[in-house]
Structures are given as structure tokens and as C-alpha cells.
Amino acid sequence: MNGTLTYHKIIQSFKSLGLKRDTPIIAHISLKSLGDVKGGAETVLGALLATADNVMMPSFTYRTMVIPEFGPEDNAVTYGSARYQNLNAEIFTSSMSTDLPDSQVVEALRYYPDISRSQHPILSFTGLGLDTALESQTLEKPYGHIAAMMSQNAWVLLMGTKPSQNFSLHYAEQLAGRKQFTRWALTPTGIVECPHFPGCPEGFHKVLYHLEGELYRTQVGDTTWYYMSLDNLISVASNLIKEDPYTLLCNELSCKRCNAVRRAIRKESSSQSLKDS
Ligand SMILES: [Zn+2]
């Protein structure tokens, strides 16, 4: 570790990655992994907003989730298993704090003037200067804001976070036709169904080898920061999945969501071979 991380060191690192003022950014930031930061989350956020005008970050709220008694099959969920936890679920509101484990920077952003937040009850994002993109995320289109960011030539910043935090890749999974899941959440209008819920991201690091020129990285203390073109990320990842439907899944044998995806692929290919024969 190279001692305390300062505002100037963060700015320098952003410059070396190629961040530009007019390029919108989807940022995933782990303050904990950055070690000792002088001024903490406020310093990190200040440096980011001094470098780029338009930024969004995940502000997820898993504590709105409920598990019903029945639902679609092969959904990596045990129906009826959360009768007690369901009683403690909270109704989503725009002012709800995020409950991601390492969320100090997005929590600092939530109190920034002029921010807006998308209204997905579980997978909301909070951003600055990106209202139209954020409005594109809906229950039916949980990756609508990612698509909107692609049309604005956005880039993704991973700052001390694991590549598995790269949420945009779930949009590539959807585009490639990969099985996704259904979850449910409490909203002011009652329990709502949340389709296209993401699968397991633990195999996402495998995409980094394929991004070539559109990926920049820099070592800061003990962490690697990545900066990548969203457009390239989505097209490379969705093509990889179309070529090999098992790619970017994790290697954990007991992973419920990855195993459900594998079963869906096998089912699809056996029905395809029946059609072909
Ligand atoms: Zn998995």
C-alpha cells in the first residue's frame, strides 16, 4: 500500500485512465478497497465530479424484496421460504438509502444537489445530469438506462470494485437471450413483479481479456481501476455469449443462478436438435 490516497492522486489516476469531462460515466466504486482516503467518500466523489460532468452509480435496495408462495419454475428461488423476512421488507421510495455493502460514495452522491434516481424498486441508479437515461429504466426494462447510456457513448469506471460489479453486463446477457430471473418488490402501489432480474455476475471478470483497445487500467495502491467503453463492452460480451452460451458464468458448482442458466441452455439445445432431426 502506498499510504493515504489523496484528491490529487485520484484526479491524476482518472487522467491516466482517460476520463473526460463530456463522457458520461457509469461508476462502480468500492471505498473500502481503496484503503485510507483523505476525506473519505466526499473526496472520491468530489474528484469524480471534478473530472466528469455526468455520472451514475447503482443505489440498489434489496430490502424491498419479497418472496411469494408460488412463481415461475427454475427461478433460483425457494417459494414460501421468506414468510418471516417478507414482514420486514420495506416499501421502495426515492429517498431510501442503498443497502449495497460498500455504498458510501453513492450515499454521498444521493445528498448532492440536482441528482436524480431511477424508480426501479430493487435496481435503481442515482446520477447527475443523466435524468433522461435514468428515466429509461423501468420495471419491464431494468437495463433501459444502460441502453440509453450506450447511445450517449458512455464509459464504465470500476474503481476498486471487482469486475463482478459491472452491472451493464447483465444487459449484454439479456441482448444475447440468456435466461434471467423474476423477483418481486414492495412499492407504494403494492407488490410488483420485476422481470429480467440479473443472474450471477461472479464469472464477469472473464470478459476483460476480450475488450482489447477499449479497456484502460491503472494500479492505485493495492487496487486496479478499470475504464472501458460501454458500447464495446456490451457488443463484445453479447457476441461472446451468442458464440458460447456458457461463457461468463461462474465456476461455483453449487451456484443456483448459473446452474439454472445452464439448464435453460441444455433445454434450448435439446429442443433445437429435436427440431433439426
Ligand atoms: Zn454463479
Image (cartoon, rainbow, N blue to C red):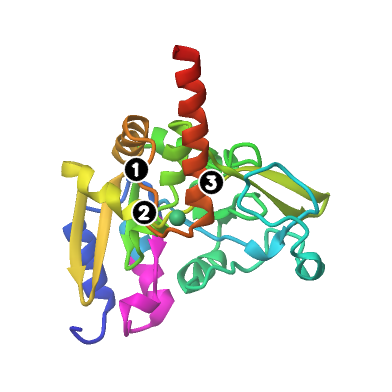
In the rendered image, the vertical position of residue 169 relative to residue 33, given as above or below: above
**In the rendered image, which quarter is residue 237 located in?**
top left
**What is the crowding at mark 3: few (fewer than 14 residues within 10 Å), some, or many (at least 20)?**
some
Of residues 138 and 186, the one nearer the viewer is 186
Which residue carries the number 3 mark? 260
Q: CA distance from mark 3 to mark 1?
A: 14 Å
Residue 28 part of the magenta segment: yes
Q: CA distance from mark 2 to mark 3?
A: 15 Å
**What is the crowding at mark 1: few (fewer than 14 residues within 10 Å), some, or many (at least 20)?**
some
> Considering the image in quadrants, where does the C terminus appear?
top left
Q: Residue at x 55, y 61 (%)?
A: 59
The part of the chain drawn in magenta is 27-47
Which residue carries the number 2 mark? 203
Image coordinates of residue 23 in percent, x first then y, are 32, 45
Image coordinates of residue 170 in percent, x first then y, are 46, 44
Which residue carries the number 1 mark? 247
Q: First in sequence, mark 3 or 1: give its number.
A: 1
Q: Is the CB atom of the residue marked by disc 2 within 8 angstroms of ligand 1's nearest atom?
A: yes
Residue 235 part of the magenta segment: no
Tell me, yes or no, if residue 276 can be seen here. Answer: yes
